[in-house]
Amino acid sequence: MIGAMIGVGVFGLPYAFTQSGFTVGLLQLLVLGVLLTILQLMFAEVVVQTPGAHRLVSYVGLYLGPVCKWVTLVAFALGIWGAMLAYMVVGGGFLHSLFFPLLGGVPSTYSYVVAIFSSLFIFGGLKYASKIEVMVIVILLFLFLFIILASLPHIQFRHYVPVTVSHFFVPYGVILFAFAGLGIVPEIKEVLGNAHSKLMSPVILFGMSTILFLYAFFSFAIVGVSGPATSVTAFEGLVPYLGETFRVVTALLGSITIFSIYLVLGIELLNTFKFDFHRSHRVSWFFVCIVPVLLFYFGFREFIDIISFVGGVFGGILGILVAVMYWVMRRSGDCKTHHCINFPAPLTWILIAVFSLGIIIEFLMRFNLL
């Protein structure tokens, strides 16, 4: 769960926090982190109570009907493809930083390398990916710890003070993108096997708490050092303070992390096409891998704009559908395996209201109306 959820979204958090003010960004991170944890637990209950092997799109179809199933497919697929596109952008930057002194070239060329190399491994599926996932999680956690500890001596607390009211909502979509991971819940059930009904909730609570903790401290460290000079992908602003060795280490570890999570995202979408729409492995793989490459080719390359829109709009749509699906399941009384987590109905409507407002705000921001 941690390996699938922590990704390039976290690299955009410090920049988003400096736009709104660190305290505003941190408050949004905590509130949305709690709400998204509740949403994960809601979906986990649906997964536990529903027999059979399904993915997010199919679960929505079972409880909300075929129209909502297709809406979910579009939102989920566009969200995954948007995330893979963001990984191409950032991964290309990491590889360019790492290999430019030896091979030359431009970042866009390396972005295509990220996509092509990852696509070869996506074809192998979940079991193949799981063999490298533990190693990558260790590398990822080391990268976070390395950056936080290296930054501490250079922190200036005056960087946490400014607040820009006009940019209050900038972190919202970036945070939702950073916490995106509803599609991993059915994969957790598959990994846990017969123990899934007892362990799903503890896994989600531990995973989400760990992710929230890392995001908060990572943003604290980056903003404290870089302040207004915080770069879009966080790391460039630290190089003047932490030196060339820091650049090489973060580029190397960042490249490995990008590859891993691009791989997991691709497999999530591939399994959706296979299990929920009964497409062949080869056809599913082709469509999963070609779309982000085409989007990149046609010029969608602005990192913050990509992750903010994908998180705020597509993440919001999926959040609404999952909340409604949980509400329908609770009203049906379909709790066969064990007693369902009984979240009160008003909480469901709060989630729906937050995600709906976020979608509206994201569109207003994209058209410069807010």
Image: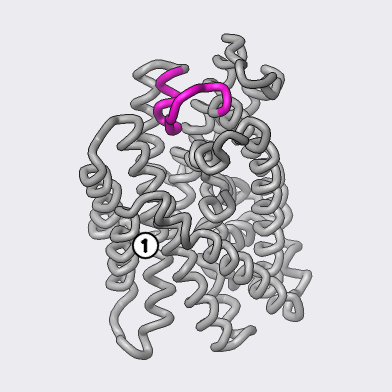
On screen, residue 368 versus residue 234, left or right, reads: left
Three-letter amino acid code at the position of disc 1: Met
Q: Position of residue 142 (x, y in %)?
A: 63, 70
The local secondary structure at tag 1 comes to helix
Q: Looking at the picture, does residue 246 appear above or below residue 157?
A: below
Q: Provide the major secondary structure of the magenta segment.
A: helix
Q: Looking at the picture, does residue 71 appear above or below residue 28?
A: above
- Residue closest to the eye, 364 or 359: 359
Spot the residue most to the right: 157
Q: Looking at the picture, does residue 39 appear above or below residue 294?
A: above
On screen, residue 103 versus residue 340, left or right, reads: left
Q: Residue at x 56, y 16 (%)?
A: 329
Label 1 sits on residue? 88
User: Would residue 370 be seen by someone viewing this image from the given angle?
Assistant: no
Q: Is residue 50 magenta?
A: yes
- Residue closest to the eye, 184 or 297: 184
- Residue closest to the eye, 268 or 302: 268
Q: Give the magenta-colored segment's residue range.
A: 48-62
On screen, residue 187 versus residue 116, left or right, reads: right
**Residue 48, quarter of the rendered image:** top right
Asked which colour scheme the image uses, the reply is one colour
**Residue 242, quarter of the rendered image:** bottom right
Q: Residue at x 55, y 33 (%)?
A: 355
Q: Position of residue 292 (x, y in %)?
A: 30, 53
On screen, residue 300 versus residue 314, left or right, reads: left
Q: Residue at x 26, y 43 (%)?
A: 281
Q: Residue at x 47, y 17 (%)?
A: 63
Q: Residues within 10 Å of mark 1 (few under 14, many from 20)?
A: many
Q: Is residue 3 magenta?
A: no
Q: Position of residue 110 (x, y in %)?
A: 32, 72
User: Would residue 319 be seen by someone viewing this image from the given angle?
Assistant: yes
